[in-house]
Image (spheres, rainbow, N blue to C red):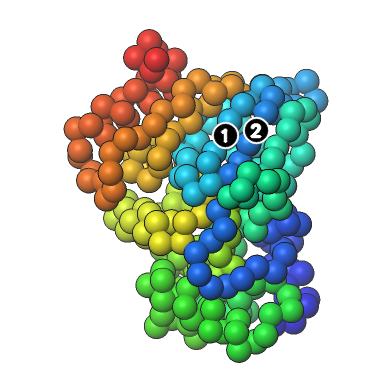
Amino acid sequence: MTSIAHERFHAVAEEPAYAREKAPAAGRSAAAAISLTGLEKSFGANRVLRGINLHIPGGQFVAVIGKSGCGKSTLLRILMGLDEPSAGELHFEDADGAQASPNARIVFQEPRLLPWLSVADNVVVGLGDGVDSRAAAKAADAVLAEVQLGEKTGEWPARLSGGQRQRVALARALVSRPGVLALDEPLGALDALTRISMQELINRVWRELGFTAVLVTHDVSEAVHLADRVIVLDEGRIALDLPIPYPRPRRHGHPGLAELEGRLLAAILGTDGGH
């Protein structure tokens, strides 16, 4: 792949600087813990995040939900280095508790694939520069098999369905075995059945690879099915931090999950049942 193509990708995908570092393409991820202390973000007079204190242990899956404009995507952008906080501290820690610069990746709602590259070459983009071409091709083939697209390596993005394109975007993020994976409404544009299938896929690869996951979603059901805990943001503050105690795989329609969904919806709407 040419350097021009690589530069164009980063302009489209808007990855942070530390996400462009080379990372190993085999084995489980080196999951990073995330600590936020007194985090603030303002745009002019508008305070979007207000004193966020949050610790996410390495390897945990956290979902962030709330009304539109509550600060979810801003929080995710700060975690990924795409925005700077106005105040407060953000730290990543390795398994020994030492500060670390994580190998971090993000998956957006739009796949943001390069139409002039094959499926496999789009995935190779996620490895960055300087990777041996044979090793890169092998890594791309392996991760495409993980997301059930092993037979599509030579296809063009235009020939794929919406769900398949989003799986390629997920494979591109996973090929470097990230320690932190951010998911910004990655399933929002998919139909209901494809969305459920993608939820199962994300759950499986998270369990297999062990990265720390932070999902932003408007879908309360999606949050409780995927996450270890769900954070509700309201006007830039944490309104509820709710653990999800049920083992995986989680069945849609489970009465316990339905009760938790009710608590989360109540917290979003600001009724007493959310507390």
The C terminus is located in which quarter? Answer: top left
For the point 61% across and 48% down, the residue is 96
Q: Which residue is mark 2?
A: 36
For the point 41% across and 80% down, the residue is 150
Of the pair 267 and 116, the residue shown nearer to us: 267
Secondary structure under badge 1? strand
Q: Residue furthest top?
A: 272
Q: Amino acid at mark 2?
A: Leu
**Quadrant location of residue 179?**
bottom right
Q: Position of residue 254 (x, y in %)?
A: 20, 38
Q: Position of residue 144 (x, y in %)?
A: 46, 75
Q: Position of residue 270 (x, y in %)?
A: 44, 15
Q: How many marks?
A: 2
Of the pair 124 and 270, the residue shown nearer to us: 124
Q: Residues within 10 Å of mark 1 (few under 14, many from 20)?
A: some
Label annotation for residue 55: 1
**Is residue 43 depicted above or below 34 in this figure?**
above
Secondary structure under badge 2? strand
Considering only order in the chain, which callout, 1 or 2, is on the residue closer to the N terminus? 2
Q: Residue furthest front?
A: 96
Q: Amino acid at mark 1?
A: His
- Res 128 seen here: yes
Of the pair 61 and 5, the residue shown nearer to us: 61
**Is 95 on the left-hand or right-hand side of 187?**
right
**Quadrant location of residue 204?**
bottom left
Mark 2 touching mark 1, by CB under 8 A? yes
- Res 14 seen here: no
Q: Position of residue 203 (x, y in %)?
A: 38, 54
For the point 78% across and 20% down, the residue is 45
Separation of marks 2 and 1 at Cα, in angstroms: 6 Å
Q: Residues within 10 Å of mark 2 (few under 14, many from 20)?
A: some
